[in-house]
Amino acid sequence: MKSFKQTRLASAISLAVLAPLFTSHSLARTDDSAATQEQKGLEVIEVTAQRRTQSIQEVPISIATLSGDEFENLFSGAGDILEFAVRVPGVYAESSNGRVAPRFYIRGLGNTDFDLAASQPVSIIMDDVVMENVVLKSFPLFDIQQVEVIRGPQGTLFGRNTTAGIIKFDTVKPSEDFDAYVKASYGSFNTTNIEGAIGGGLGDGLSGRISVLSQERDDWIDNIASPEGDAIGGFDEKAWRAQLLYTPNSDLSILAQLHGRDLTGTASIFRANVFTRGSNELNENYTRDKVIYDANLLGNGFDNNPQEYEGFGGSFKVDYDLGDVTITSITAYEEADGFSLGDIDGGFGSAADFTPDPRPGFIPFDAVTRDSLNDLEQVTQEIRFTSNTNDALQWQAGAFYFDSSFSVTSTDGFFGATTVFHDNTTWAVFGQASYELTERLTVTGGVRYTDDEKSLEVGDQNVNGFALVIGAASIQDYQPVNVDDGQTSFELSANYRLTDDVSLFARFANGFRAQSIQGRDIAFEGNPSVADAETINSIEGGIKADLLDDTLRINAALFAYEVDDIQLSAIGGANNGNSLLNADKGRAFGFEIDARYLVTENFEITAGFSLNDTELQDDTLLVAPCGANCTVLDPLVDGLALVDGNPFPQAPETIFNFTARYAIPFGDDGEIFVFTDWAFQGDTNLFLYDAIEFTTDDQFEGGLRVGYQNFSHGYTFSMFARNITDEDNVKGAIDFNNLTGIVNDPRIVGIEAKFTFY
């Protein structure tokens, strides 16, 4: 990792490179800031949840948005996409793969599969392009215009693998008007976060924008089994985006975008025996800034959980207005490569010839695994025809094509290296229409047919594996696995405006998650597993209201859904497996509420709450419980846990979040402000089975920012803190040979400066 001096030098160079670009433009009062000072009520929020721009209050779907202070504050401490966990009611995220391969959950529905080929029921859409692979979902977030969280199945317009919902990211697009900004922060552990963008007109209908991001943190965790201090925990993330927008006339728009990332750092930190049998509290084996890893002492070349990933992609979007119809074409390409390595047992196993003091409890055997994503290529093509009139009937129709190929290599210290090859091809046709029956009542219906085909092939087995040498494993002859399915998704919704400020909505939606193939168990002499497609039927209803002269906004929804053949991942057990399976049904009900209140012109608060009551329903579903000495509460049948009636894994029962911003006018053109944000997570089961040690409860994190903003000169200086109370929250666990835990990041305190140019 870079030294503090190198980090400061890199920061200075970045600012120096951007500064000349701004010399012909003075710092100026921003339009957004001026509007904020003059507004008397809450701003109108526009979303594209139905593939057309609408007010959030008009869309018959439960939607939450993040932008401005709420978004920027989450990433002051160089956080990644996991910062969204419990920041929106009903939304959770976690990972056992560090800053790549996040796993998302909406209304309790998600997927705990940690394989690099895992499918998820929450779709990540970035600038209208689906990021299907789990690594693509982790692309860094910067220069973001708005985030939309669209809850519930979205199969009609967005396709398969959206049974839980969508998180949609829209970046700032080029425009003819010049604008630029640079933002830099420095905090604990030499954490730096530098972000900047510049854009404007280039002449003859052409405009462009370039955005960059640099996030760094020094290693800050000691591996006391290693001679070096501060050996683990850091990262160096670089990302960029370049866009060109060509609008030769009012009817044609062509947007070309390229982007890339380069990540070097630490994978997840696994901590051995940090739970005591019968308790889910962290015990004396846990120290935030210390671990005891022996992987680097065993002569296998694995050292301190390294992680490296690269990615590159681009898209080409054309909008052509034919008058009554607009044609949209989006062509996109993504690629990625990289690896993560982990000392999976989280400590110092019995095979080591050196015994550190103190040893983190008994670990019966060593486990070190490296997973590599190789040659990922994703190609997508979408074409849409959208009505462009003021008629009562509005419609859109289109087609979609998706093709993806990659391989995953898993390298285990005992079995060796195994490579599996994945291919996935999908095509779909869809249509949706809305009709204004009266001035107050609008109904919407849509349908989509999707065909999805997947295949898996296995490369050479047990390459250089010790198990093969001693006869504990053998070369297996695996036949290719091919699965395909075609499904129809549909939805019907209605929006009724009680008044100009209050509307009611109801929605019934159907969707499906395509069949999945899991090849990870092949690395451990197991067989590949296949899960059939899951289908969901969801019903919801709610209210959207702007009250008190548009100073109070309340959006609330009740929902219930049933998933047939719900796809699950049986993870862990004594053999540390990861196998796909289907349960008969998964059922859930609950509600969410989002509120925003402009108390005074200078004081605004937001609050959100969700309840997700989830339940697995399959009286024959048995899974392997922990291989470690944990306390399983489920009935056991021949040593297997009966999980019928358990909540979904990693599905918080409740989520509560809160923000407040208070400003004090300072001088004629500035303000001193205080912003705070808090998120609370209720009871959460980490695995399919129910065990005391692997259930979390009552976790929370808070953030604070205090600063000065000058509107006329466009600059802001602030101090910030993330995880301000330094909470030690359990986010995951590994259960196969000891009581291993994964915890959140520590408190990060720092300073930040932002300069905006117009």
Image (cartoon, grey):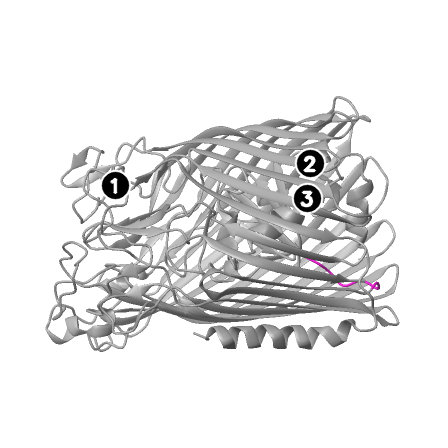
List x then y, in percent, for residue 752: 61, 59
Q: Is label 3 or label 1 in front? A: 1
The three-letter amino acid code for the residue at tag 3 is: Gln
Numbered range of the magenta stretch: 171-177
Q: Which residue is mark 3?
A: 50
What element does badge 3 sit on?
loop
Q: Residue at x 64, y 35 (%)?
A: 605
Q: Which residue is mark 1?
A: 693
* Cα–Cα span, label 2 and label 1: 42 Å
Is 597 placed left or right of 742 in the picture? right
Chain-order first, disc 2 or disc 1: 2
* The C terminus lies in quadrant: bottom right
What element does badge 2 sit on?
strand
For the image, the number of numbered tags is 3
**Viewer-nearest residue: 547 or 617:** 547
Q: Which residue is mark 2?
A: 603
The three-letter amino acid code for the residue at tag 1 is: Glu
Determine which quarter of the picture holds residue 292.
bottom left
List x then y, in percent, for residue 352: 14, 68
Is 283 placed left or right of 590 in the picture? left
The three-letter amino acid code for the residue at tag 2 is: Phe
Q: Is residue 87 above or below residue 258?
A: above
Q: Residue at x 66, y 65 (%)?
A: 331
List x then y, in percent, for residue 70: 62, 46
List x then y, in percent, for residue 384: 71, 54
Does the segment drawn in magenta span residue 368? no
Furthest toward the top, the residue is 498
